Each structure stands twice: as C-alpha cells, then as structure tokens.
Image: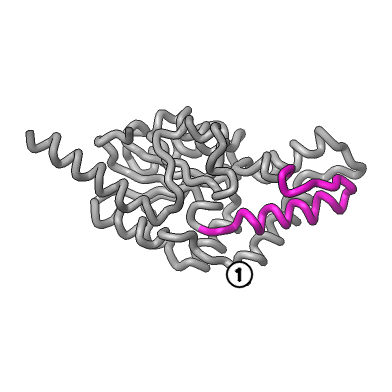
Amino acid sequence: MVSTQIKAVIFDMDGILIDSEPAWQLAEQTVLNSFGLNLSLEDVEQTTGLRIDHVVSYWHQRFPWPNYDNTATANTIVNEVVSQINAHGQPMLGVVESLEACKRLGLKIGLATSSSSLIIEAVLHKLAISHYFDAIESAENLDYGKPHPEVYLNCAKGLDIAPSQCIAIEDSFNGLIAARAASMQTVAIPAPHTATQTKWVIAHHQLAHAGLLPALLNKVAALLERTTSC
C-alpha cells in the first residue's frame, strides 16, 4: 500500500517519461556488437537502469575486447540515443496527465535518472516538459549510479522533502532497488513484456502504464485528506 504521507513524486526518465529504451537497446547493440560481442535484446535488457559507463564496463568484464575505451564507447552510445530521441522521441502514455495531476495535488516533482545531461536536455526539450520539474538530478558524475540510492537521495534533498515522503516511479529493477534503498515509496511501471516477472514484487505498487498514475495519486490524496480531517 502506498503511504498517505507523500509530498513529492520523483520520476525516472528512460522508459517512464519517454519511450527511449528501444533507442538505448539499439544503440548498445549496434556499438557493442561492433566489437564482436553479438549481444541480443535479452542481453542488453539485463543492464536497463544502469549508467552507461557501467553498462560498457559490465560487458567488457564479461567479453573483453581490444583497445578498450570506456568513455569513447559510452559517448558513442549516448550520441546515438540523442539522435534517436531528437528524431523519434514520444512521451510514454499518460506522462503529461501524470505531471498535471502532481501539480494539481500540490506535490513537488523531481527527476532522478542515470542518463547524462545531454540526454536529459534532449528529452525535456523534445517533450516540452522541463517546466514541471522542481529538481532534476543525474547520476552522471556520481561515484555510483543506480542501483545505488544517491541520485534519489540528492533529488529528495533538492526538493527539500524527506525521502520517506517521496514516491519514485520506475521501470527498471535497478531503479527500484535504488529507490527502496533511499527509503522511498515505489511504483513500478515495467515494460509490458516483463510485467509478469516476479521481481516487481519489491515495488509497493505496480501499474500497467503511467496513464494509471493520476488515479493512484488521487487515491493517496483522498486518504491523506481523510486522515488529516479526523
């Protein structure tokens, strides 16, 4: 059950605000397979939610290739993703309605992502939603990305809201681990083809798509109003 003491909603970006996961997966497969890795879609899905330098490191540790340059490889992948977002980026179902619901309910809105500033700028510009966010945090320059909780803790600090009074919206298992470690409430909105996997049980709530988030937030707000009026 989601807590009634929620004062802020913190969104992950890739796969929650924008349907960028296919772009990430294609870019990772294209670039990494150029080194002879032969990664499948199922392979690259394993690293969903990780920071891109950690993704590159993850695969190099398993399948080392010569002339390894993590930064150059990560930058090539990021640039390809930015190009895909600029050309084809679309908001996920219900995103704008969810952001509007947060504003209407007086909830602060944060963004906590593993993606780089280049991709954040591309997404917010493409979707024209930057004005909704009260705090934006990236794990790009942190010592650790998700599943470490630091990016979520930084976002809560930026919102001036206790982590326990934040609800995190995630599509990845690594992101859920990060939000849970930050002592936040969690809502999982996984990709449809993974929605029945048992791992999502670690989320406090699971939704089929972001279009259902306003109803959940309205329910939380109604419960809060009821408890405070007693």
- Tell me what residue is drawn at x 57 percent, y 45 percent: 114
Query: For this view, does 21 lie left or right of residue 187?
Result: right
Is 32 a magenta residue? Answer: yes
Is 179 a magenta residue? Answer: no
| Residue 94 in picture, x, y percent from top left | 41, 59
| Residue 100 in picture, x, y percent from top left | 32, 60
- Tell me what residue is drawn at x 19 percent, y 44 percent: 222
Query: For this view, does 119 lie left or right of residue 176?
Result: right
Residue to which mark 1 is pinned: 88
- Tell me what residue is drawn at x 81 percent, y 38 percent: 60
User: Does 55 appear above or below 87?
Assistant: above
User: Does 160 appear above or below 95?
Assistant: above
| Residue 12 in picture, x, y percent from top left | 49, 47
Going by the picture, which residue comes out furthest to the front? 196
What residue span does the magenta drawing correspond to? 18-43
Q: Amino acid at mark 1?
A: His
Rendering quarter of residue 101: bottom left
- Tell me what residue is drawn at x 36 percent, y 57 percent: 99
Which quadrant does the C terminus fall into?
Answer: top left
Q: For mark 1, give the secondary structure.
A: helix
Magenta stretch: dominant secondary structure? helix
User: Which residue is at the front of the view, 51 or 226?
Assistant: 226
User: Does 23 appear above or below 149?
Assistant: below
